[in-house]
Amino acid sequence: MSESKLDLEPCAIYLEDIKEPHKTKCNHVFCKDCIIQWRKKKKDCPLCRTKIPGVLPSIVELDSLLDKCRLDVKNHTMQGMLEILKGIANIVRDFND
């Protein structure tokens, strides 16, 4: 998915340009903050009403976690790696909720 504003429709929740695009499991794209707030109230997609288990993390967020993990492996810091793995586990848990 391209994160360029030129390739995206306006956010269907607040009807403006999408900021920090996030894709649901049903492949609809919304602003990260918009869909997170929406999911606090409803568990279905605002467009198709498919149950959405969570918001997929952005590539940037996952890359950042992986970079930190690589650094901790390189520096042999087990505690740092455990914290990153907990963060990844939280992302997966939030996605499946």
Image (tube, rainbow, N blue to C red):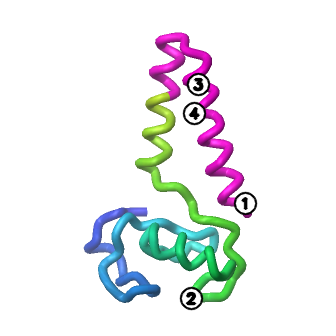
Hey, what amino acid is under mark 3? Answer: Met
Q: Badges 4 and 2: C-beta atoms under 8 Å apart?
A: no
Q: Where is residue 96 in the image (x, y as percent from the top left)?
A: 72, 60
Q: Could you classify mark 2 by the number of other residues whose Cα lies within 10 Å: few (under 14), some (14-19), or many (20 or more)?
A: few
Q: Earlier in the sequence, mark 2 or mark 3?
A: 2
Q: Residue 24, image x and y in percent?
A: 58, 70
Q: Give the range drawn in magenta.
A: 69-97
- First in sequence, mark 4 or 2: give its number: 2
Is 86 contained in the magenta span? Answer: yes
Q: Which of marks 4 and 2 is in front?
A: 4
Dot 1 crowding, Cα within 10 Å, few <14, some 14–19, many 20+: few
Which element type, helix, strand or loop, lies under badge 3? helix
Q: Which amino acid does label 2 sit on?
A: Leu
The residue pinned by badge 2 equals 47
Left or right of 91 on screen, residue 59:
left
Q: Which residue is drawn at 46% across and 67% down?
A: 32
How far across and down, in percent of the image, does residue 78 sit?
61, 17
Q: Left or right? Give the position of 49 relative to 17.
A: right
Residue 81 - label: 3
Query: Mark 4 belongs to which amino acid?
Result: Ile
93 over 41 or under it: above or below: above
Whole-number angstrom distance, CA of label 4 to CA of label 1: 19 Å
Residue at the spot of label 1: 96
Alpha carbon distance from label 3 to label 1: 23 Å
